[in-house]
């Protein structure tokens, strides 16, 4: 495998893991999970929710054991789980690790949900291990046909700039996340013009929206603020989705803004 292909695979894995992290947090907050399959540049994979629902669909699959421990040397949570498939009478393990710290705006801070993420991913991996490949493929096809797919676009490499951006006094400096290339002549498709439209559009894309972002109408623009600290990968994905609606980050106001651009009809 060439270095370029390795980099693409790494980018895909990080995007899918970040999306699963978001699903796990949404599950903790009692949000219904709808995205069963992820798609990145033509490659598809069951999401965290997809693995659980595929196991339920197959039936007679149970988690027999789940353990989590902390590795002080590596500063990470390590989890294992055993899944049993009664249809095939097999038991297989699943393993996962989750760093204790997460990257937020180039700063490492404790992730209060790291233990839960490790445990949930170990269960996900154990379920995937005991399900037949043909069942996984059939469930993915049904989910894709049913519109339960989320496309995850890998962020473009950030180009270093010599121009400095100023942050509002009292706010931590924010490094601009990479943004996908957008033709200058093409305007964002159907940008939301009301708070209800914005809420509906983002809720379709972001699990646990109410615990992640705060939305408000400021007259000429719609404001999207952060309700909690976001990991770098998670923030990059949210940035990409907001960019689809023509939104941009404002260092001055420490939020994303989407100009309404409402024109009056004669």
Image: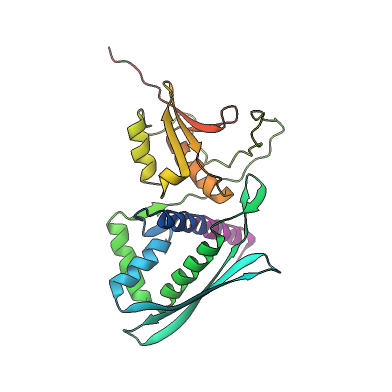
Report the residue at 36% width, 71% height from top.
136
Corner quadrant of residue 162: top right
Q: Is residue 133 magenta?
A: no
- In this rendering, the answer to whether 219 lies above or below 43 is above
The quadrant the N terminus occupies is bottom right
Residue at x-position 29% and y-position 76%:
59
Of all residues shown, which one is farthest toward the top? 266
Res. 47 visible in picture: no
How far across and how far down the image is residue 156, in percent?
A: 56, 45
Question: Going 37% across and 77% down the picture, which residue do you hit?
Answer: 62
Q: In which quarter of the view is residue 57 placed? A: bottom left
Query: Total label count?
Result: 0
| 176 is higher (above) or lower (below) than 135 | above
| Residue 35 on image: x %, y % | 36, 56
| Residue 73 falls left or right of residue 112 | right
What secondary structure characterizes most of the magenta part?
helix
Residue 127's x, y, as percent? 41, 74
Q: Is residue 52 visible?
A: yes
Left or right: where 226 falls relative to 39: right
Colouring convention used in this rendered image of the protein: rainbow
* Residue 9 lies in the magenta-colored region: yes
Task: Tell me the quarter of the image containing the C terminus.
Answer: top left
The range drawn in magenta is 1-16
Where does the image place residue 118, in percent across and percent down from the top left?
53, 66
- In the rendered image, the vertical position of residue 193 relative to residue 61, given as above or below: above
Q: Nearer the viewer, residue 91 or 262?
A: 91
């Amino acid at each position: 495998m060439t270095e370029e292909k390795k980099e693409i695979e790494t980018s895909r894995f990080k995007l899918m893991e970040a999306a699963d992290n978001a699903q796990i947090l949404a599950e903790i907050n009692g949000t219904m999970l709808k995205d069963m399959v992820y798609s990145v540049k033509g490659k598809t994979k069951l999401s965290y929710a997809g693995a659980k629902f595929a196991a339920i669909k197959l039936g007679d699959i149970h988690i027999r054991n789940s353990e989590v421990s902390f590795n002080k040397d590596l500063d990470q949570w390590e989890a294992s789980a055993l899944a049993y498939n009664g249809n095939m009478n097999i038991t297989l393990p699943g393993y996962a690790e989750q760093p204790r710290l997460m990257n937020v705006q180039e700063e490492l801070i404790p992730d209060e949900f790291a233990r839960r993420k490790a445990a949930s991913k170990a269960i996900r991996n154990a379920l995937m291990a005991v399900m037949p490949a043909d069942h996984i493929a059939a469930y993915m096809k049904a989910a894709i046909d049913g519109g339960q797919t989320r496309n995850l676009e890998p962020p473009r490499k950030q180009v270093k700039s010599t121009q400095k951006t100023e942050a509002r006094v009292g706010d931590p400096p924010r490094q601009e996340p990479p943004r996908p290339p957008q033709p200058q002549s093409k305007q964002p498709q159907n940008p939301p013009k009301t708070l209800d439209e914005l809420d509906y559009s983002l809720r379709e894309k972001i699990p646990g929206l109410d615990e992640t972002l705060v939305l408000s109408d400021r007259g000429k623009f719609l404001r999207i603020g952060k309700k909690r600290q976001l990991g770098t990968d998670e923030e990059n994905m949210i940035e990409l989705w907001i960019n689809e609606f023509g939104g941009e980050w404002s260092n001055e106001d420490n939020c994303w803004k989407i100009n309404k651009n409402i024109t009056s009809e004669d």
